[in-house]
Image (cartoon, coloured by chain):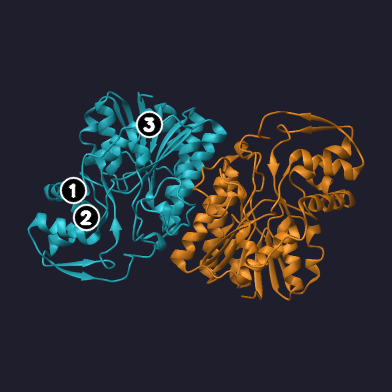
Chain colours: A cyan, B orange
Amino acid sequence: MSIARAFITGGAGFIGSHLADRLLASGCHVTVYDNFSTGMDRFLDAASMSARCEIVRGDVLDTAALGAAVARSKPDVVFHLAANADVRFGTQHPRRDVEQNTIATFNVLEAMRAAGSTRIAFSSTGSIYGEADVFPTPERAPFPVQTSLYGASKLAGEGLIAAYCEGFGFTGYIFRFVSILGERYSHGHVFDFYRSLRTNPAELTILGNGHQRKSYLHVQDCIDAILMVVERSPERVNIYNLGTDEYCEVNDSIGWITAHLGIDPVRHYTGGERGWIGDNPFIFLDTAKVRALGWTPKLSIREGIIRTLDYLRANPWLFEARG
Amino acid sequence: MSIARAFITGGAGFIGSHLADRLLASGCHVTVYDNFSTGMDRFLDAASMSARCEIVRGDVLDTAALGAAVARSKPDVVFHLAANADVRFGTQHPRRDVEQNTIATFNVLEAMRAAGSTRIAFSSTGSIYGEADVFPTPERAPFPVQTSLYGASKLAGEGLIAAYCEGFGFTGYIFRFVSILGERYSHGHVFDFYRSLRTNPAELTILGNGHQRKSYLHVQDCIDAILMVVERSPERVNIYNLGTDEYCEVNDSIGWITAHLGIDPVRHYTGGERGWIGDNPFIFLDTAKVRALGWTPKLSIREGIIRTLDYLRANPWLFEARG
């Protein structure tokens, strides 16, 4: 089903702004809805030039502003990407995950229901599998136990969307991401490592023991998958893992980064299997379901990391902006 | 681990008031916290006679009142039973499930965290398995897709509790109930059927086709299981299905009811596999895990229905109170 009008919450963010660019390039009318708390005006430099792009500064917790914007946009599909993506510090402010990931999703669903808009795509996370005992982890893995507020708050969002599909005739597209990398990336391991190495290329502190295994996906591969699923997947509730069919250790990632930068820092490990409380030592998703639709990622994890690094080197302003 | 001090949200409700009675009988100090929206003073007639029982009229959405009550109670265990249990009409007021089941659970967890209380027992539901494809359904069934706002809002509560266990050192006891029956029951099939038959014993309207398969558990068996799990189950996150190892069709239930009442009404079926949108045509839980702790239900489904019926006949005031 093609998309003529799209509404993107978090549309000024890392993934959202790329999605806006892609949808605009395909002739779509796009409403970006973002509170610019982590979203960036500069990410919308290209998008904002389009007559088919409307940018609304608003918060997903502001139900009146959100409702008015959705009603005005009349979207075929709402891409609900706005979220608190700060996985690591969940225990420092548990309310943030509940409000920004669970209640915000409810607000988006209610705004859609009021506006008669019934297709929603949602950025969930591989973290909702908690400590999986099946690898790669399929969508219908054994019912997981949550290990982070982030995962729990996204699981709650998934559940609400599925219930709206059943109860209100919505169609849901739920994406359980591994970590996403690429241009405009400004959050997570590679960002943190590169920021540290810019300041001090001689040393690097690594949370945990470095053996945490992680999967990454490049943002353009991610968006390819999202758009393919929204166009082709026929169910009422469409749930897809998104990732590459490989994983790496944090140590591999550091090796690629330092080799690309031509440096060899001394590595200090804080120790332990987890980088922080609630960190998953291993996320590796089974992506057979999305591949069966015809999608395949174009970039390996290593290539994604290198492209991210090249972007960060070319955009030092991002480090100022992120403080 | 034994319980000296307990805090029961929804303590004036059907299950909560029985739990209060049982804990008081075992010498425990009990704080009942209830807004009496569906809870009943009369359910606490016995409990309120005890010097070890404190009754607080408060709402779980009133964070200040809740926080003060938990802090004053200093409970070993919080039994969080307050909920919107109105499964059927979720689509008429979706906010109710989100607020009363998800946000309320978050409020309880935050009140506990502030008070340094870290053990929580939670009434979840077999509805979170959605349309299960494994019967009887075990706790680690394939990751389900939600089919009701009620199930989704309880799933969100479970996720939050598990995340607090991991992030804040809480211990969680999560109970996925089938429908509970027994004395003080005032909600669900048996109540609705008996109420209708009191008015007109010649006819009965049945939502769906009557072949919906349901499991029921008697409230005392339910409380036996809850207390056994809280005392014996050693994990950080303890998740248990609670139910009998049998099920019945709605038609069986009607047969037992009408036979016990000595009537033979004409049955009218509204048709369809589901009684309402989001109704699960079949809930049947695998209870091997709780049985392995030594628990076994004392009453069959049929016996539970008969005892419920006898209670309802002896307490016509309940029909006035429920309108």
Q: Determine crowd level at label 3: few under 14, some 14-19, many 20+ residues with C-alpha closer than 10 A.
A: many
Reading the image, the residue beneath label 2 is A190
Q: In which quarter of the image is residue A263?
A: bottom left
Q: What residue type is labelled 2?
A: Val
Query: Callout 2: helix, strand or loop?
Result: helix
Q: Distance between the residues labelled 3 and 1?
A: 26 Å
In this image, B133 relative to A254: left or right? right
Element carrying mark 3: helix
Tag 1 near tag 2, CB within 8 Å: yes
Name the residue beneath numbered marker 1: A308
Q: Which residue is drawn at 81% across and 40% down?
A: B254
Please report, as a chain letter, where disc 2 is located.
A
Q: How far apart are marks 3 and 2 (CA)?
A: 29 Å
**Please, what is the three-letter code of the amino acid marked with disc 3?**
Val
Q: Nearer the viewer, mark 3 or mark 2?
A: 3
Does residue A57 show up?
no
On-image quarter of the N terminus of chain A: top left
| Chain of the residue where label 1 is placed in the rendered structure | A
Residue A193 rendering spot, x and y as whole percentages: 20, 59
Task: From the top left corner, tell me how far across and down residue A119 is, in percent.
Answer: 44, 31
Q: Which mark is residue A230?
A: 3
Label 3 or label 1, whichever lies nearer to me, is: 3
Q: Which of A74 and A180 is in front in this view?
A: A180
